[in-house]
Image: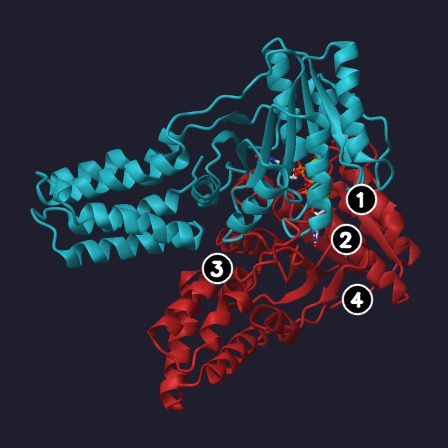
Chain colours: A red, B cyan
Amino acid sequence: MADRTPWSLSGALRGMFAKKTIDDDTWEDLEDALIGADFGPTITDSVIDELREQVRKYATTDPDDLKRMLRENLEERLARLDPTLTLSARPAVVLVVGVNGVGKTTTIGKFSRFLVTRGRSVVVGAADTFRAAAVEQLATWAERGGAQIVRPQQQGQDPASVAFQTVEKAIAEGIDIAVIDTAGRLQTKSGLMDELTKIRRVIEKQTEIAEVLLVLDATTGQNGLAQAEAFIEHAGVTGLVLTKLDGSAKGGFVLAVQERTGIPIKLVGQGEGIGDLTGFTPHVFVQNLVG
Amino acid sequence: MATFGNLTDRLADTFKNLRGKGKLSPADIDGTVREIRRALLDADVALDVVKEFTGKVRERALSDEVSKALNPAQQVVQIVNEELVGILGGEQRRLRFAKTAPTVIMLAGLQGAGKTTLAGKLAKWLAGEGHTPLLVAADLQRPNAVTQLQVVGEQAGAQVFAPEPGNGVGNPVKVAKDSIRFAKDKQYDVVIVDTAGRLGVDAELMKQAGDIRKAVDPDEVLFVIDAMIGQDAVATAKAFQDGVDFTGVVLTKLDGDSRGGAALSVASVTGRPIIFASTGERLEDFEPFHPERMASRILDLGDILTLIEQA
Ligand SMILES: Nc1nc2c(ncn2[C@@H]2O[C@H](COP(=O)(O)OP(=O)(O)OP(=O)(O)O)[C@@H](O)[C@H]2O)c(=O)[nH]1
Ligand SMILES: Nc1nc2c(ncn2[C@@H]2O[C@H](COP(=O)(O)OP(=O)(O)OP(=O)(O)O)[C@@H](O)[C@H]2O)c(=O)[nH]1
Ligand SMILES: [Mg+2]
Ligand SMILES: [Mg+2]
């Protein structure tokens, strides 16, 4: 394994840009590369149509021009939405949702640290009362991140009541930010999706929710779209977090998610360490992708 | 399980266009192959696998076997189905047990794929079959992975071998090695080794997984993969094949609506059989993987044949 270099779009595109002129193979290679990065057939077609049009308009045959156009095209698409987190309310309540195993709890650990090092006080709420050892896992992350934690008082307690108690504590003690962890759930499970709606409702009785972050795993394929649509409907998502970008997957599906839903990517996770979380910068994302 | 649902719809639409055609022109076949390609890509089947697959289907569709068939469109459907079943592994493959106990099963895969949950599922199922499984906590990295396995073990009614606390403390290779001696002493007849999630590109952790494999000499190494994975399935599967040389695949989270193209990708690229399907968060939510059933579900063959026959 050690000698394998990770897959990258730039690797996939290398042959194509090494050529002297743009020809039919160029377009086919480009299509393959975009599909391989999980952009999906629809976005891929749309990007290629636009680039063909541009190449025609500027009458260029130089693959370097095409590369620049590709970079600009993707960057422009990704930059259409504002990635700023809205955390000015006090307390600012952040609800974290997503399907199973995408990295919600880990992201909360990293995010807490991020906020605490910027001088904010943070409390996390362990509203995943279902998964084995989820509370202990969050407690470990809270400790690493320098956040307080509200745990369920008994096994299997209603997650909405844990969320309520977390916000209650933040209000009573003047804690700046309350971040609520929820159990992973597949978007097709209507009972579990209704539970999220209930958690929202219960929090909103106390205060407005500042951000609802949907965590998406970069290794996901086209199912990411279905995930986003369902969580937007049931949880009122305001931002996306893309995790596991340290792997070989490129997470191209998020572009389709952004375009289809109008919800911006706000944070990016790139590892299992507490410092491995950054804001989303279209330029950097595209640079890593296209090279 | 609604896996592949949309792929089925797509293919059904495609084949509907062919119905009633006594003879298929090369243009008909190209159009159909394009639709199949598109449907498979939407289902996250890896691009190389799609190309190979559609190439084969196209070649066979243009051959005598179709032009001489009574109903050429129906014949194309059958070809697609046959090729799908072929890739998915043909016959169902059962778990292999050691001639002399203990049987050792090692689990490996990406972060969050469902390994620890599967460990519990296997333990519960094996205990129900009269075995005495031992779960081994060799993920000493992910926060509270050891605690998680202990909870899962308790739910499954199985013993957990957890000499190290984890959260960065302890050597997983040593734990794995010691667990085999422990199992022999205490006469557990199946040992299930849970390992930390790792990325295909993480050479260091991949080597550690290889070392765990060497230390326990497993009868099965199961590569656990999330059915929602996209095009990365191939790179990841190859990395795990190089790193731990897995003997079988488990597809998880099949209770969702992902089309699970990874099943095709991984089976095709590694040649390893898919042995189990994981279909939920509860320990009883898993079943043996049936290639035939999966393939006919991909195509919804019965319905498509009816459509064509009605033409
Ligand atoms: N490589 C890598 N691994 C990550 C990243 N984020 C999370 N993980 C790992 O992914 C696995 C699952 O992370 P969790 O935080 O438990 O995910 P979750 O969404 O809370 O899972 P559930 O609560 O079970 O739904 C763990 O092994 C994490 O260490 C990341 O950015 N990169
Ligand atoms: N819906 C569904 N969820 C599953 C399935 N299998 C596992 N999960 C969930 O997926 C999440 C991750 O499962 P784990 O068993 O912790 O995964 P893992 O591979 O051990 O994760 P790491 O140890 O962090 O690499 C948990 O929320 C599980 O409940 C399944 O078949 N269906
Ligand atoms: Mg969690
Ligand atoms: Mg685990």
Q: Amino acid at mark 4?
A: Ala
Q: Amino acid at mark 3?
A: Gly
Whole-angstrom CA distance, mark 2 to mark 3, is: 30 Å
Q: Nearer the viewer, mark 2 or mark 3?
A: 3
User: Which badge, 1 or 3, is on the more N-terminal residue?
Assistant: 3
Q: Residue at x 67, y 44 (%)?
A: B111
Q: Amino acid at mark 2?
A: Ile
User: Within 10 angstroms of label 3, few (less than 14), some, or many (20 or more) residues?
Assistant: many
- Chain for disc number 1: A
Q: Residue at x 47, y 32 (%)?
A: B273
Q: Which residue is mark 4?
A: A89
**Foreground of the two, B56 or A221:** B56
Please say if A76 is above or below A10. Answer: below
- Residue B105 in picture, x, y percent from top left: 64, 25
- Chain for disc number 4: A
Does the CB distance between marks 2 and 1 fall below 8 Å?
Answer: yes
Secondary structure at badge 4 equals loop
Q: Residue furthest front?
A: A3
Q: Going by the image, does A145 lie left or right of B86?
A: right
- Chain for disc number 3: A
Q: Which residue is mark 1?
A: A138
Q: Amino acid at mark 1?
A: Leu
Please say if A230 is above or below A80. Answer: above
User: Which badge, 3 or 4, is on the more N-terminal residue?
Assistant: 3
Mark 1 CB near ligand 3 (8 Å cut): yes
Secondary structure at badge 1 equals helix
Secondary structure at badge 2 equals helix
User: Which badge, 2 or 3, is on the more N-terminal residue?
Assistant: 3
Q: Nearer the viewer, mark 3 or mark 4?
A: 3
Q: Which residue is mark 2?
A: A108
Secondary structure at badge 3 equals helix
